[in-house]
Amino acid sequence: MDTLWSLPDFDGHEAVHIVTDEPTGLKAVIAMHSTHLGPAAGGTRFWHYANHADAVTDALRLSRGMSYKNAMAGLPLGGGKTVILADENKTKTPEMIAAFARAVDRLGGNYVTAEDVGMTVEDMIAISEHTDYVAGLPVEDGAEVGGDPGPHTALGVFLGLKAAVKRKLGKDNLDGLHIAIQGAGSVASHLARHCADEDARLSIADVATDRVEALAAETGATIVDPADILFIEADVVSPCALGAILTEDSIAKLNTGIIAGAANNQLATRDDGKRLQARDILYCPDYVINAGGIINVSTEYLKDGGADLVRQRIEAIPTRLDQIWDESEASGRDPAAVADAMAQRLIGRG
């Protein structure tokens, strides 16, 4: 049997905590990849996994991604992530959330949590009743930052997508371009609105029928079968759902020149970055383009600035992407590998 240290996605993680609370049914993995730049920060994902090994793998990959994301965003934070193992019915109780919050508190501020897939702002409020080490709380009266990270993530993705369009297609706007968006959740919906405001032609897909129909009605988008959305002919494909969707098989079927989306861990393996490059598809490394949400909630948690600083940090995302693409062209390495190397240097592992 593999040990934790021999797992493919173990990357010198500083700590991996297995949390169990039998009275509430809580099972969770808190992975802390790096605290080189500050406390390990990253949200909590509430998800049903086919087996425990998949949950550990997800926590390892996501926490490493947060180290890279926070470093590349210029934040004084390390990287961490939690996955809570939900049952098939995704049963979530106040007692379970309280038990998780106490587990976070026992780490003494070395890990700071926030919202992720399957968790809500209300869950963050409940967690805050038991620990101070939580961000993404509702905006208080007079506060400039905080609250739902979704719109900030979407803004960063939108600006990064436009930078990719300018670099690949030579256009300063999205007028008439075809954007295919996988997902219709909070981030994908805000992204679709931004693109529609610039008169882009949209195709969208989501397994939640009501949600995707409402978004299509609002933005004039065409609804596509979720099985087909990645492979339709489009100027930009924007994955905004779950990760590991860019594989050897799926990359071979892509019919686009740009991948620019909000999903975490889009590449199934590191070799998939090379496969995109070999097909001349411009890739926006996910943890660089989707950093807007953590920029907002970290500014709230650290209390180191207001809305102007959040906007300034998000508007720097295209500049970082251009730096990655410049180095990629100069070195011949794919953008994902270049971004990883940059992030590793920043967290003292270069």
Image: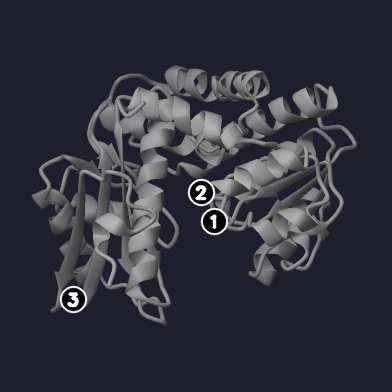
In this view, the residue in front, 299 or 179, is: 179
> For the residue marked with disc 2, what is the amino acid?
Asn
Res. 144 image quadrant: top left
Q: Helix or strand or loop: what does disc 3 sit on?
A: loop
Circles 1 and 2: CB atoms closer than 8 Å:
yes
SS under mark 2: loop
Crowding near pointer 3: few (<14 within 10 Å), some, many (20+)? some
Residue 74, horizontal then vertical, whole percent: 40, 22
**Residue labelled with disc 2:** 264
254 vs 328, left or right, is right
Q: Are marks 3 and 1 in contact (CB under 8 Å)?
A: no
> According to the image, what is the colour scheme of the structure?
one colour
Viewer-closest of 108 and 253: 253
User: In front of the other: label 2 or label 3?
Assistant: 2
Q: Which residue is mark 1?
A: 243
For the residue carrying disc 2, how many other residues have a C-alpha within 10 Å: few (<14), some (14-19), or many (20+)?
many
> The residue tagged with tag 1: helix, strand or loop?
loop
Judging depth in this view, the residue of 262 and 138 nearest the camera is: 262
Residue occupied by mark 3: 24
